[in-house]
Amino acid sequence: MKKLFENPTKVFALTKEETRRLYDNLYNEMIEEGKDVVDYQKLKAMSTGVLCPDCNSSHVIKNGLQSGVQNYRCKNCGRQFRVTTGTFMYGVHEKGKMLEYIKCMSAGMSLRECARIVHISLTTSFFWRHRILCAMQSFEDNVNFFGIVELEELLMNYSEKGKKKREKKGIKNLTKKKPTKVAVLAATDRSGNILFKKLEDKRVQADHISDFLKSRISKDSIVCGSNKKAFKTVNAEHIKHKEITNKNKMKGGIYSVLTVHEKITDFVGWIYFKFRGVATKYLTNYIMWFVIKGKYLADRIIEDTGRMLNLAASDRGAWERYKNLMSLTYVIYNI
């Protein structure tokens, strides 16, 4: 498509296959037209309409320019905002560097490599990574399961990697409150759908499984779980028209948890060998990165840059999620 940003309305009439090609070529198109991530954020707003970040109302009007940027005002609640308000780009000063940063992430570069190539500080590189990953969490709503669904529990080591050391007295007071393990529920089906869910508990419970599956699983699917207690005691009434099959009821090799075990092995290797472990505080972000890599990305740098940008720009609640994440303490008191 020629001159994407000069003819934005053409995007709204694309077929599914044409849209996929658009995302694959998005990076090159933006470089050619000299556009940045905020320009694409404006394009995304045109596709859904400008919405108030507070009340989600579409009853908004233009309210002048500030530093050359269009302001809007909500006629419903009076909130003034810009197109980037609430998104992962909110408050970013060096907006012209974000596209190249996403490209570096797509290439699997470390924080230091990203910082060196994009010419930002290591601290900024860390914050930008988590801005983008927070925006990608909205992808979770698009994951559903069909046919034979495999479930398993994954216990990750609790970590405070990167945290500044406390005084000995403070460490002693917190020791009793720290968990040793964090439970993750892993799920996949035979169609390639995958999702990991970090739980605020020491172990996976039957209620966690029921809540997880309630709105994600198709009718007449079969759920295969391990022989752990939580998977045996799932309340079938909460998962209507599903058959719960544990290890003791596997039939002729058709029903198993081999696929989800392979995904867990890949995930654990990715976390501990590529990143040398991650802090529990940020585990959900890295989980979604892994899920998106396996389901949404193409393992090609240019194509993945456009896909990651499109996904991040689609979430207007990313800033709030990012702000809440950064304000969290490491110790999870309810575990």
Image: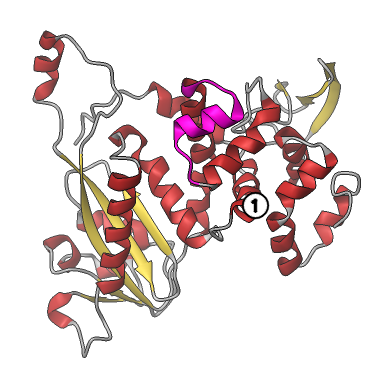
SS at circle 1: helix
The residue sitting at 13% across, 69% down in the picture is 227
Disc 1 residue crowd, few under 14, some 14–19, many 20+, Cα 10 Å: many
Query: Which residue is rendered at x = 87% and y = 51% of the image?
Result: 9
Q: Main secondary structure of the magenta part?
A: helix
The answer to whether residue 51 is visible is: no
Residue 330 in percent (x, y) is at 27, 26
Residue in view at x 56 percent, y 61 percent:
298
Closest to the observer: 236 or 111?
Answer: 111
Image coords of residue 63 (percent x, y): 84, 21
Q: State the image quarter where residue 24 is shown.
A: bottom right
Q: Please tell me whether residue 322 belongs to the stretch shown in magenta.
A: no
Q: Is 139 situated left or right of 3 in this image?
A: left
The answer to whether any part of residue 250 appears in the image is yes
Residue 120 lies in the magenta stretch: yes
The residue closer to the viewer here, 317 or 304, is: 304
Q: Is residue 245 left or right of residue 28?
A: left
Residue 238, image x, y percentages: 31, 65
Residue 94 vs residue 134: left or right? right
Q: Which residue is mark 1?
A: 302
Quadrant housing the C terminus:
top left
**Start and end of the magenta stretch?**
108-122
